[in-house]
Amino acid sequence: MILTVTLNVSIDKRYIINDFKVDEVNRVIECSYEPGGKGINVSKVAKIAGQEVTATGFVAGNAGRYIIEQLDERGIKNKFTNVLGESRSCINIYDKINKTQTELLEPGVNVSKEDEDRLFEAIEDLLPKCSVVTISGSAPRGTSHDIYQKIISLGKEYGKKVILDTSGQRLIDGIDARPTMIKPNIDEIQMLAGRKLKSKNELINLAKEIQKQGIEIVVISLGKDGSLIVSEEGAYRATVPEVKAVNTVGCGDAMIAGFAIGLKEDMKLIDTIRLASAISVASALREETGYFVKEDMEDLYDKIGISTL
């Protein structure tokens, strides 16, 4: 089983608009609502890929109940910790004419020390049943500064592989707990470096430095330019075919799902990279966030280029 941790779940709202204008009334042509948050997206993608998944984290209010209902309908097992307040909404505005995407992300609920303790009880109950843990996204207000470190350490205590996908100080602190894998994007890796990285070699060298700290796999996602991967086996560059992307939100989460599957199934790293890249690109071809079609993934799989660096 894959266990996904989403501390800041959301209802993801996608608004489609023609020629979005600031400081004016904009008419929405179409809108859709999905259970969201980065780890929830990982759950949805892994489930489509045929994996058994359990989702955990904090939920609150009517929005939290909606998220649980939607996951139940999709056959995604879940064990959330209910807290006071209302789970957040995140809005993605897609401008069909200008081909732009604008995101509005609410901060989320406030949680207490007691809420956090109950969450850890739930996670500890679920850990024996899983082989891989993914920790994704932001943490709500009130959580301890080292909550991700604690979850990583707990997962490792139970002998589980742990993937961390977050940003800012949470990423810096999380690395200290030595998860199995991290997946920073170009902005996040430069934040870790404390400077602008101008070449592929600089990116690879920094990834190697991080990997030597005890992170088995460091993946630097480069968007449409693919990814760079550093592990004990060596360094790789994955390139992806050019596609007409419909929705790029959640592509990184789809990639995390692919890597989680590869780790769970003990796949060779190159095969895992190919699978994760194909799922990520396939998810960009569909409007729904945290969704892909297997036929798209299968068509893309052999088109993923992997070179040794």
Image (spheres, rainbow, N blue to C red):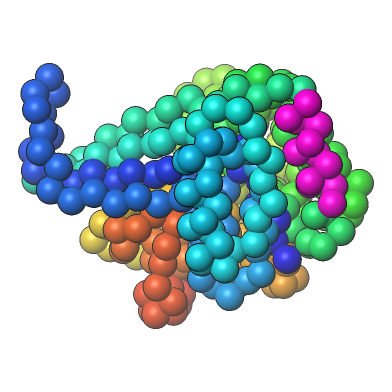
Q: Position of residue 21 (x, y in %)?
A: 10, 28
Residue located at (65% from left, 24% from top):
111
Magenta stretch contains residue 116:
yes
Q: Quadrant of residue 127?
A: bottom right
Is the C terminus in the top left, top right, bottom left or bottom right quadrant? Answer: bottom right
Is the N terminus in the top left, top right, bottom left or bottom right quadrant? Answer: bottom right
The one of 239 and 91 positioned closer to us in this rendering: 91
Q: Position of residue 200 (x, y in %)?
A: 49, 42
- In the image, the segment drawn in magenta is 114-125
Residue located at (53% from left, 42% from top):
64
The one of 278 and 295 positioned closer to us in this rendering: 295
Q: Quadrant of residue 205?
A: top right
Determine the main secondary structure of the stretch shown in magenta: helix
Residue located at (67% from left, 46% from top):
80
Q: Does residue 202 appear left or right of residue 146 in this picture?
A: left
Residue located at (80% from left, 54% from top):
126
